[in-house]
Structures are given as structure tokens and as C-alpha cells.
Image (cartoon, rainbow, N blue to C red):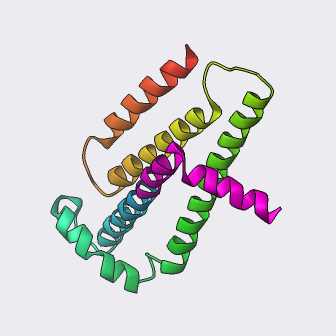
């Protein structure tokens, strides 16, 4: 069992999937950073600062007081990060294993499972980043979310 798991890891490490996994890792990091901005923005509003006076710089420096107030919790965010990385890694492994099983069975689909999985993960992480940016006061993010949803969902329905 351990040998086949190590073999699987080495196969993925030496494939194109490894580069994509690194890109997804950085999407997760950006998701967490934008989440911190959103939490800080909300905290500054709770402290009585009007939305119009909150800037990106003040939101960035709001991380420290938000952390001290318990709004940004390192344990929660750390666990969330590790959990998300593990879940996405499992999705990528599952997609790769499905492709291998289909290839061994000589079954061809219109799209590889790993390609679909990567697309889904990148879309959902990008959408989460945009939602966090909206929640941190960046204007027009709702329009971008609508545009992404309309284009992606419209193409899936075809």
C-alpha cells in the first residue's frame, strides 16, 4: 500500500499536473490573503469607520487589530488552508486515477477527468478570491462574478 502511494506521488510529481498543482496552491494562498482583507474590512466597519474612508492600505493594516480581536484566527485559517490543500490534492489524484483507469480500459471520453478537475478547482478558487475582494470593498466584483458565472455556466450547459 505504501509503495503504491509513493509510486502515485512520484508519477504526479513528474507530470504536468505538478505544475498545475503549484498554481492551484498559490490560488489557495491568494484566497486566504483576500479572506484576511475581507475580515479586516468588516472589522474596521464594526469599529465605526465608514466604508468610504476604508482603503486597501487601512484594510491591510487592519489585519493586526482584527487578529488581536480574534476575528482573524490563525488556528482556523491554518486548519482551513491545510484542509483545502489536502482536499484539492485528493481531487487531483482522483482525476488522475480515473484517467488511468479509463485508459487501461480503452474508454475514451470527450475530456480527461484531470482536465475537468483542474478547471473546476481553478474556477471555484478564482470565484472565492473575487467574493473575498467584493467583501473587502473592491468595487465591481459582483459584475465580475456574474460575468464568470454566465460564461462558465453557459458553456457547461451547451
Quadrant containing the C terminus in the rendered view: top right
Task: Depth check: give the residue in front, 29 or 17.
Answer: 17
Q: Mainly helix, strand or loop, the magenta region?
A: helix
Task: Depth check: give the residue in front, 54 or 126.
Answer: 126
Residue 112's place in the image compared with 11, above or below, is: above
Quadrant housing residue 47: bottom left
Quadrant housing residue 36: bottom left
Q: Is residue 56 left or right of residue 156?
A: left
Which residue is at a point 66% across and 41% down the rendered structure image? 96
Task: Depth check: give the residue in front, 92 or 131.
Answer: 92
Which residue is at a point 32% across and 75% down the rendered structure image? 63
Q: Position of residue 53 (x, y in %)?
A: 16, 64
Residue that protrudes farthest toward the right in the picture: 1
Q: Position of residue 25 (x, y in %)?
A: 46, 57
- Magenta-highlighted residues: 1-26
Residue 155's place in the image compared with 6, above or below, is: above
Residue 99's place in the image compared with 13, above or below, is: above
Judge whether residue 7 is colored magenta.
Answer: yes
Judge whether residue 114 is colored magenta.
Answer: no
Answer yes or no: is residue 54 visible: no
Answer yes or no: is residue 11 visible: yes
Q: Position of residue 19 (x, y in %)?
A: 45, 49
Quadrant containing the N terminus in the rendered view: bottom right
Amino acid at each position: 500500500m505504501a509503495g503504491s502511494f509513493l509510486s502515485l506521488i512520484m508519477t504526479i510529481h513528474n507530470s504536468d499536473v505538478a505544475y498545475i498543482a503549484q498554481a492551484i496552491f498559490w490560488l489557495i494562498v491568494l484566497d486566504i490573503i483576500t479572506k484576511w482583507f475581507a475580515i479586516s474590512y468588516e472589522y474596521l466597519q464594526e469599529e465605526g469607520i465608514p466604508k468610504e474612508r476604508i482603503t486597501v492600505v487601512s484594510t491591510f493594516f487592519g489585519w493586526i487589530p482584527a487578529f488581536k480581536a480574534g476575528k482573524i484566527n490563525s488556528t482556523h485559517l491554518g486548519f482551513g488552508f491545510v484542509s483545502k490543500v489536502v482536499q484539492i490534492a485528493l481531487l487531483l489524484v482522483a482525476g488522475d486515477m480515473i484517467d488511468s483507469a479509463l485508459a487501461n480500459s480503452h474508454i475514451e471520453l470527450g475530456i480527461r477527468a484531470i482536465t475537468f478537475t483542474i478547471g473546476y478547482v481553478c474556477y471555484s478558487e478564482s470565484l472565492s478570491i473575487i467574493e473575498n475582494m467584493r467583501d473587502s470593498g473592491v468595487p465591481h466584483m459582483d459584475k465580475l462574478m456574474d460575468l464568470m458565472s454566465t460564461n462558465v455556466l453557459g458553456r457547461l450547459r451547451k
